[in-house]
Image (spheres, rainbow, N blue to C red):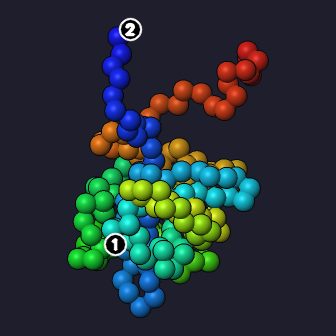
Amino acid sequence: MAKQDWKPGNMLYPVPAVMVSCARQEEKPNIITVAWAGTVCSDPAMVSVSIRPERYSHSIIEETKEFVINLVTKELAFATDYCGVRSGRDIDKFKELGLTPQPSKIVKAPGIAESPLNMECAVREIKRLGSHDMFIAEIVNVTVDDSFMDEKGKFNLNDAGLVAYSHGEYFELGEKLGKFGYSVQKKGK
C-alpha cells in the first residue's frame, strides 16, 4: 500500500459540528459554529472548544466565562454552516435564521431551542495555543429534547440525525456498527 508524507496539519476527522451560543448582558446573543470541540473529562463533566481570538464570540466567551454547546442535526446543518461564515458583529444570527433563544437554567447565555441537546458550560481555564485559544469548561447543566425520550426514560440521541464535520464537509451520522465493548462480548448476547 503506497502512502505519502504531508506537512504537519490537523487531520483528525470526523469531528462534531456544534453551534456554540453566547451572550453579553444587554446585547443580542450570538452563535458561532465550532468543529474543534471535544470531551476533556467525565468527572467533573468537562469539554473544550477552540476559537480563533479574532472571532466575535471569542471576546464574549472570554469576558462572560460561559457558553452553551448545542448539538447539530440534519435540520440545523444550513444554520450551522451559516453561523460559521457570518459574523455576529454584523447580524443577529438567531433572528436571521429563525432560531429560538432558549433560556438556560444556570448560565446567562441562551441555548438553541431547535437543538436536541444543550450543554450549559462554565469556563474554568483558557489556554492560548497559537491560532486558537482553547476554552476548557465544566458542563453545569444539560437540557434534552423530550421527543427523543422513550417510554422507559432512555434518551435516544442517536435518533436525532446528528451531524459531523470532516475535511470541509458536513455528514449526517449513519449506520450503527456496534456498541461499546462489542469486540469482547460473548457470542449470543
Characterize the local packing of mark 1: few (<14), some (14-19) or many (20 or more) Cα atoms within 10 angstroms: some
Count of labels in the image: 2
Q: Is residue 34 above or below residue 88?
A: above
Residue 117 appearing in the image: no
Residue 154 appearing in the image: yes
Q: Is residue 181 above or below residue 57?
A: above
Tag 2 residue: 1
Three-letter code, disc 1: Tyr
Residue at 58% of width from left, 69% of height from top? 123
The earlier-in-sequence mark between 2 and 1 is: 2
Determine the secondary structure under disc 1.
helix
Residues at marks 2 and 1, CA–CA distance in whole angstroms: 45 Å
The front one of 62 and 188 is 62
The front one of 46 and 51 is 51
The image quarter in which residue 54 lies = bottom left
Determine the secondary structure under disc 2.
loop
Tag 1 residue: 56
